[in-house]
Amino acid sequence: MNYIFYFLIVISIIAGAVNGKLDDVINSILSGAELSVKVAFSLIGIMAFWLGMMKIAEKSGLIAIIAKIIKPITKRLFNEIPEDSPAVGDITMNFSANAFGLANAATPIGIKAMEELQRHNKDKTSASNAMCTFLAMNTAGFQLIPATVIAVLVGAGYKNPTSIIAPTLLVTSIAFVSAIILAKIFQKFWKPQEENGGEE
């Protein structure tokens, strides 16, 4: 990725020099760098707020309550793992972090959930159905409040950043449900090796 950005910058400078607009290119680079710093600082506040909220929810037991509420759903989606597995709580926290648009917070939680799912995986050399389903859900990234995107829009000076909530909710809901459905459909065609008698 670094090479791609370096290539784009070099090409831009060369094109600007050839067209006699090198000053415009340099000004764009400097203004872009300034804007990136503003956006980064605007992210600090909202990320700190939501990460703090997630920590409070975890310490107060709210995550455990949410886990119990969605337990019938997780039990049906992840019927390969025990109901009292720590993976259920990790999956709940990951879902909550994604729902509030905290992708940076959701990533380490998702890794922890995958580690727990791997413990219940009978074939350690390949992903289980539960792991594939969780990966599909996590990749789809259902978002109730796209906090990170809103913070970026605020930093960029957008006048109505919350207008993105409705379309984001619609699109991510469709993607989330579609990912689960497709994961379950594909599970019918690709069975674990122990179910196929060890055949490929």
Image (cartoon, rainbow, N blue to C red):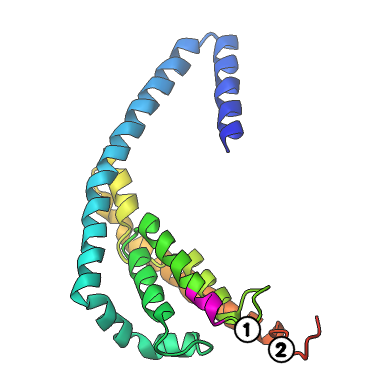
Residue plotted at (60% across, 22% down): 11
Left/right placement of residue 129 relative to residue 156 reads right
Q: Which mark is residue 122?
A: 1
* Residue at the top extreme of this rendering: 20
**Vertically, is 169 above or below 29?**
below
Residue plotted at (51% across, 90% down): 79
Which amino acid does the dot numbered 2 rest on? Glu
Residue plotted at (57% across, 27% down): 6
Is mark 2 in CB contact (under 8 Å) with mark 1?
A: yes
Is label 2 in a helix, a strand or a loop? loop
Q: Which mark is residue 194?
A: 2
Spatial CA distance of label 2 from label 1 is 8 Å
**In front: 42, or 14?**
42
**In front: 159, or 173?**
173
Which amino acid does the dot numbered 1 rest on? Lys
Question: Badge 2, how many Cα within 10 Å: few under 14, some, many 20+?
Answer: few
Is label 1 in a helix, a strand or a loop? loop
Q: Which residues are magenta?
A: 116-120
